[in-house]
Amino acid sequence: MEKFRDQEFLEFLVKSIVDNPSDVVVERKIDEMGVLLTLKVNRADMGQIVGRQGSTAKSIRSLLRIVGMKNNARVNLKILEPEGGPMPRQHVSEEPSDVDKAMEELKNL
């Protein structure tokens, strides 16, 4: 399978962040909206990819836009929720955590 700069960049970036780099999978599709990169990571690494209030995910998307502009393409990122859904909460709280809020925001994009 041919690798493209945007796909290679995302793989390198995410594998540098997560604890389970062998579980990182990036798929690339082209449609009428541009390039769509779909990211799958280990369930335990989702918090590292999303970040506080989605800040890491937003930063990754910004960097991908820059890579896309350099290659005259619109690059979008879709982060897939791992199988089994979100990880169970470690503590009991009535208010959703920042990660849960960010995941909901990502689902609504």
Image (spheres, grey):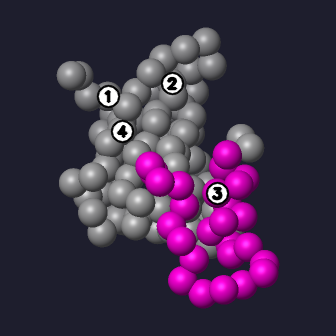
- Relative to residue 13, is residue 32 drawn left or right? right
The kind of residue on which mark 1 rests is Phe
Q: Report which quarter residue 53 is drawn in.
A: bottom right
Q: Which residue is mark 4?
A: 26
Q: Earlier in the sequence, mark 3 or mark 2?
A: 2
Instruction: Tell me the tag on residue 4.
Output: 1
Residues marked 2 and 4 touching at CB (< 8 Å):
no
Instruction: Using the image as rendered, state which of residue 35 and residue 81 is in the foreground.
Output: 81
Q: CA distance from mark 2 to mark 4?
A: 12 Å
Q: Which of label 2 and label 4 is nearer to you? A: 4
Magenta range is: 82-107
Q: Which of label 4 and label 1 is nearer to you? A: 4
Tag 2, which secondary structure? strand
The kind of residue on which mark 3 rests is Met
Q: Which residue is mark 3?
A: 103
Q: Which of label 1 and label 3 is nearer to you? A: 3
Q: Quadrant of the C terminus?
A: top right
